Amino acid sequence: MKQLIVLSGKGGTGKTSVTAAFAHLASEGKYANQFIMADADVDAANLELVLQPQRIEEEEFRGGQVALIDQETCVSCGDCQNICRFDAIDYTDGAYIVDPIACDGCAACVYQCATNSITMHEQVVGKFYVSEGRYGTLYHANLFPGQDNSGKLVTLVKQRARLQALDEERKLVIVDGPPGIGCPVISATSGADLALIIAEPTVSGVHDMHRVLETVQHFGVSALVCTNKADIYPEGTKEIEDFCIDSGIPFIGRIPFDLTVASAMVEGEAVTAFDSEAPASIAIRDIWSRVLDSLLEGEA
Amino acid sequence: MEIVVASGKGGTGKTTVATSLAMVASEQNTIRFLDCDVEAPNARLFLDPELDTVKEVGILIPNVDDDTCTYCGKCAEVCQFHAIAVIGKKTLVFPELCHGCGSCTLVCPENAITEELDVMGVLESGNAIKNIDFAQGVMNIGEPMAVPIIRELKRWAPAKASAIEIRDSPPGASCPVVETIRGADFALLVTEPTPFGLHDLKQVVEITKEFEMPTGVVINRDGIGNNAVEAYCEEVGIPIMMRIPMERRIAEAIASGKPLLKAAPEYQKDFENMLGNIITEVGA
Amino acid sequence: MKIAISISGNTINDPFDPRFGRTSTFCIIDTESEEWETYENPAFSASGGAGVQASQIIAEKGAEAIISGAFGPKAFDTLSAAKIEMYTASGNEGFAAQDVLEMFKNGQLPKTESASHGGHHGGGR
């Protein structure tokens, strides 16, 4: 079983549109019924909007704890506010109260409170789903806005997808990754066999591609690069391609700027299914076959 | 006054809007610009600051003195993140798990713990075009946590006191976004009129609602997709402050690092009006 | 000797779970008396540092060896400090804890001398 992760560094480079197209293409090729999808962008889980699956399982996701001050026993000494390094304790209307959004869950205040007035409480911070869609099973989740712990939820999504793939001896897990280079990206990348970086040839996109490439290399995952909206800034595209050649990273294709992608999104379809002859669709098909070659190299 | 520019979905044009707004505002006021997207800081590419002040930032992690430590295990017991383990006659510290809360230091009965800075990134500041006082945070590669860097960036002093502070937020709707939005007076949310844009916009609106913060929307790439964003804004009573149509020449200019107002100066007026409306809204 | 095995379930006949920090349960077996007990793993739902916490639990229960699927760097350091020997078994074969124990007794399980992977399966700070 292999795990592919689709990443970008910069947000909005087209990760999800490409991943959705991969799901469509995988369902048509020899890997039909051999793969599972996982949406690891739990902050902005959009794969569902394209795959339009039916939820078959739903679980609450409990994340970190937050402190709560018992106003009955609190003597308003203010010690908790002094020691809190997360500015999470407010003094309003003569009472100390915890701002649950700022609270980091460290419980330092619990141990310092002279009157034992502070306790920790677990929070439901998101939901985890298993869905069946037109292209097969999708594992996904929704982290409630403003919540912490996305790394752990990402891990849960990936782990469950992986376990099903192992149980059913499926060949591939395709993971739609989050933007950035932080905790959720690290969690999403861990255990992957291959990362496909979708770079946008803009000054911002090039900058962020370097950072995400360094991140996947830091965690020992090999990477392929392709560009999206490739023709919008030819100098940027060239810079990306030259960089890939110089550093020995395979550059596997250019997806042109194509408004068909947005139209497909509005219709809730993968662009390759919406219009298989659109310029973007043709490019994505080619990239997909190269990704498969690289991923399943040497396998029967 | 502090204005935060956020979006939910990545790549909708947050940085384009934030930097354009800063340029317009700097004609009237002193402006402080904070790039809080510490995982992918890009505003610098458009504002071109001369970054002459640098500071390392991170969190304070424990350092246990083996000579005074009695292996009582109190530190491991209070650590919610299992960043300290006491096993037999050994105290192990795992910096990558530490949140820097200081709880272990406070409870240690032997005062055997001192704290040292674990560097997670840098803050940089300097003067940008049009005398915008610019500062950004840059997170180190492989570092999982952005929030401490954003928190320090907001507190950082070198940027002078200004009439208007503009913060460029990271994408998404989780803790780094909340930390960026926290304490601002107005949230300007940049979206695109597509199902993804709408879905992610709703997530950020949940946060600004929680903060009871005045909020407005900018529709970028207007003309692609559908009108579901407008319908939603109307339904929840959030004003659409500005629209930027989908134009290939704008996309190309921004791709090459050219500020929007240079490529399409006709939007100058729209940004001025929007800034005026924001100031009125916050003042009201 | 006392040996711990990560499992999902609550008896020695339940499946072996290759996850160390995030396993739901540890089965601890006394290889001389063949007696066993199971303990819930509190690190199962920890927000970070599951490997460290799980290591501390089995050290407290007096285990001298552990069989799991893999050990991250922090679990490895903690288990090493506690002088607990680490062995790995495959998680993809549908073994029960009992099967894994037999394989251990027959000397079929490889001993782990360094962390099996880069760790960081989420959580963290």
Image (spheres, rainbow, N blue to C red):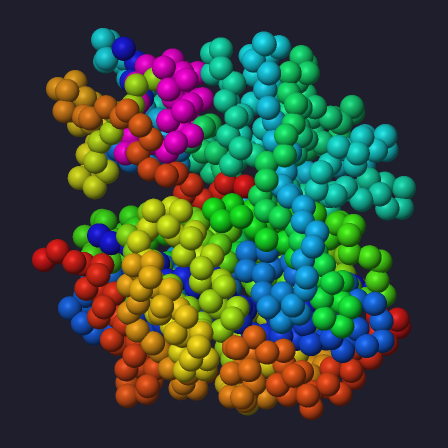
Residue A299 locus on image (x, y percent): 13, 56
Q: From the viewer's perspective, is C124 left or right of C108?
A: right
Q: Does B179 sit above or below residue A75? A: below
**The C terminus of chain B: image quadrant:** bottom right
* Visible residue check, residue A145: no
Residue C19 locus on image (x, y percent): 33, 36
Q: Residue at x 50, y 40 (%)?
A: C124
**The N terminus of chain B: image quadrant:** bottom right
Q: Does B208 sit above or below residue B21? A: above
Residue B132 locus on image (x, y percent): 76, 67
- Most extreme residue toward the left, as rendered? A300
Residue C10 magenta: no
Q: Report the front residue among B103 and A159.
A: B103
Magenta segment: C54-83
Q: Report the front residue among C21 and B252.
A: B252
Q: Report the front residue among B163 and A292.
A: B163
* Visible residue check, residue B223: yes
| Residue A225, quarter of picture | bottom left
Q: Residue at x 23, y 38 (%)?
A: C91
Q: Does A102 sit above or below residue C105? A: below
Q: Report the front residue among C19 and C114.
A: C114
Q: From the viewer's perspective, is A120 left or right of A156?
A: right
Q: Residue at x 25, y 65 (%)?
A: A291
Q: Residue at x 16, y 58 (%)?
A: A297
